[in-house]
Image (cartoon, rainbow, N blue to C red):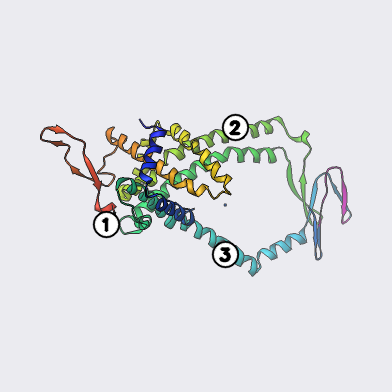
Amino acid sequence: MWTRRDLKEQAKFHLRGKYWMAFVVTLILGILAGNGGGSGAGTSYNFSGMGNRHSYNGSTYGNGRFFLDSRLVDEINRFLASPWFQLAAAFVIAAVIFGIAYQIFVAGPIRVGAMRWFSRSRETEGTPSVSQMFSLFRRGRYMGSVSGMLWRGFWLWIWSTLSSIPLIAALIFFVFGNNLVNIVSENGGYIINFNLDSSGTGFVGILAVVMGIMISAALSILVVVKTYSYHLVPWILADNPAIGARRALTLSKNLTRGNKFEMFVLDLSFIGWYLLGLLLCCVGVIFVTPYYTATYTELYAALRDAGVNNGEVTMEELGYKRVQPSSIEGYETAAVYSVNEVSNDPEV
């Protein structure tokens, strides 16, 4: 069994003489891997509030009705078809695609490389080179780290999206089920009716919104649980990027089983440090990150050793090799492992 105190003491011990290098690693990681009415020429539209009435082309509109002239619609269509808008839209789409691709193919391996630096730092007396952060870009490691982090991110996205569906569905039902908004064609334009009278909102619609909020809140708790379940994936891939995306995710879930609440409490124990960092013009937060990451590296090592003892994984599967036999001259001894060459850098 691990305790928060033991993890933090071990983290402090392994950071001795290495803190500033750890600070540089987390700093690089943060940088590289780290969101009413109007008028126009020849076109006009009106919006009236509750109880007010306005006239347009001989017709009167009121009680939250919005007249959208068809000429304005034509101007909007012409604007959307203009080269400037299409160029801007293409730029935005390209930026989004680039951002997603960067997170998958660059930020993911860098994040795994940073966890690799912290793992190797605790396992060796020397201080690993900062280049350890980029060691996952080498042949035989790159695609494993990319696929593993992508698989983790995909499932986190699935659970996050799932948690928002009930609330969105309830709001859509509330708005359209109670006819709070409807659009009709009239007098060469479009009338958008906002029926804001509370008497039009039925009990079923209000109940649907309340239920949607409650279900989404419950699913959000499940998202937090899943986040802790997948939390160890970067460290697992750091040990052995060739372990496979599915296996890394499954192993993370197995190692964190029964420990997620304690991990949550471990996070809470750092609130004081982060609040202190915020008081120092937010700059102090970056000085806490090495300590936090080193503590979680100690947690991974503790859960990994427990998993080995329970037969859930072997050190060999995680990229280590046995350098001392388990039995010498009839006496049982603990096996000693070192990192295989395929998952280690020569300078470490």
The quadrant the C terminus occupies is: bottom left
- Image-quadrant location for residue 236: top left
What's the amino acid at mark 1?
A: Pro
Give the answer, above or below, for where 219 lies relative to 55.
Answer: above
Q: How many marks?
A: 3
Of the two numbered discs 2 and 3 on the same chain, state the one appearing first in sequence. Answer: 3
Report which residue position mark 3 lands on: 91
Along the viewing direction, whichever of 247 and 112 lies nearer the viewer: 112
The quadrant the N terminus occupies is: top left
Q: Which residue is drawn at 37% across and 32% down?
A: 2
How far, Cα to Cα, is label 3 from label 1? 43 Å
Name the spot of residue 59 as percent of width and height, x first.
87, 52
Residue 346: mark? 1
Report which residue position mark 2 lands on: 214
Of the two numbered discs 3 and 1 on the same chain, state the one appearing first in sequence. Answer: 3
133 sits to left or right of 102: left
- Image-quadrant location for residue 228: top left
- Viewer-nearest of labels 3 and 1? 1
Name the spot of residue 199 as percent of width and height, x first.
78, 33
Of the two numbered discs 2 and 1 on the same chain, state the one appearing first in sequence. Answer: 2
Dot 3: element: helix
Q: Residues within 10 Å of mark 3 (few under 14, many from 20)?
A: few
Give the answer, above or below, for where 103 lies relative to 258.
Answer: below
What's the amino acid at mark 3?
A: Phe
Asked if one can make out residue 244 in the rendered structure from this viewpoint, the answer is: no
Q: Which residue is drawn at 73% across and 34% down?
A: 201
Dot 2: element: helix
What's the amino acid at mark 2?
A: Met
Name the spot of residue 284 as percent of width and height, x first.
53, 48
Segment colored magenta: 45-57
